[in-house]
Amino acid sequence: MRMIGSVVVAILAAATSAETLAQPNAGNLTAIYGPLAMEEGVWDADVTFYENDKPGPHVLGVQTNTLLANRHWIINDLRIPATDKTPAYQGHGVWGYDPVAKTYVNTWVDTNDLGVRIDYGFWYEAENTMVWSSKQNDGNGHFVDYRIVEQFKGDVRILTFYQLGLATPTPHPLVKIVFTRRKTSTSTPAPAK
């Protein structure tokens, strides 16, 4: 009987550990999931591509960000229509706080087809800034380091995507996106006559 009691205690301890691992401290939930909520909604995207560290082609797009029901993960969908200088683009990501890795994790795929990009992020609450780091094959056999800095300024977000130099970690801007949140209509439509 004593052995059965020990097994039950061990099972309960393991279940409690798994639950603790899966659930961040309740006092930290707002701090942990706050950045996701700040990104929710539909955003107009003003996109500037860089060439040799200088601003190049400029396009407009739309990003739609939807939180999952538990508000712990967010789905990003960015679409940019084709222009006379750039092809159509679509990118799709899912990110949130990974309680096992104890950091933010993002996966991103897009029509550039260079493979799945996995980013690891750190939230700087004092500056309302998320910094992501990733490494991805450039298609030429090199694994290149990238840094993404996203500043949250209420209804405006500024995301700058950098490639770090191969020989020295000098950041070179590749893309800068200024997102402006679309206002949702709160007025009630007039009844039909």
Image (spheres, rainbow, N blue to C red):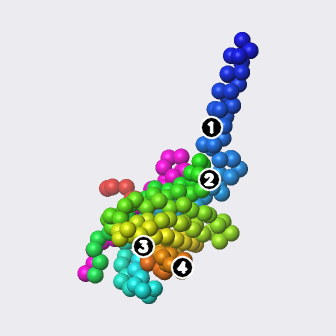
Pointer 1 with pointer 4, Cβ within 8 A: no
Position of residue 18 in the picture relative to residue 116 (left or right) = right
Q: Quadrant of residue 92?
A: bottom left
Q: Nearer the viewer, residue 67 or 103?
A: 103
Q: Amino acid at mark 3?
A: Ala
The numbered mark at residue 18 is 1
Pointer 2 with pointer 4, Cβ within 8 A: no
Quarter holding the C terminus? bottom left
Q: Position of residue 189 (x, y in %)?
A: 40, 59
Separation of residues labelled 2 and 1 (CA atoms) = 14 Å
Of the residues tagged 2 and 4, which is closer to the observer?
A: 4
Of the residues tagged 2 and 3, which is closer to the observer?
A: 2
- The answer to if 163 sits in the magenta stretch is no
Pointer 2 with pointer 1, Cβ within 8 A: no
Looking at the image, which residue is at 37% across and 82% down? 58
Separation of residues labelled 4 and 3 (CA atoms) = 31 Å
Region in magenta: 65-84
Q: Is residue 130 visible?
A: yes
Q: Amino acid at mark 1?
A: Ala
Q: Amino acid at mark 4?
A: Thr
Of the residues tagged 1 and 4, which is closer to the observer?
A: 4
Are there few (<14), some (14-19), or many (20+) residues within 10 Å of tag 1? few
Q: Which residue is mark 4?
A: 168
The numbered mark at residue 102 is 2
Are there few (<14), some (14-19), or many (20+) residues within 10 Å of tag 3? many
Q: Which residue is mark 3?
A: 45
Separation of residues labelled 2 and 3 (CA atoms) = 30 Å
Q: Quadrant of residue 129?
A: bottom right
- The answer to if 77 sits in the magenta stretch is yes
Q: Quadrant of residue 153?
A: bottom right
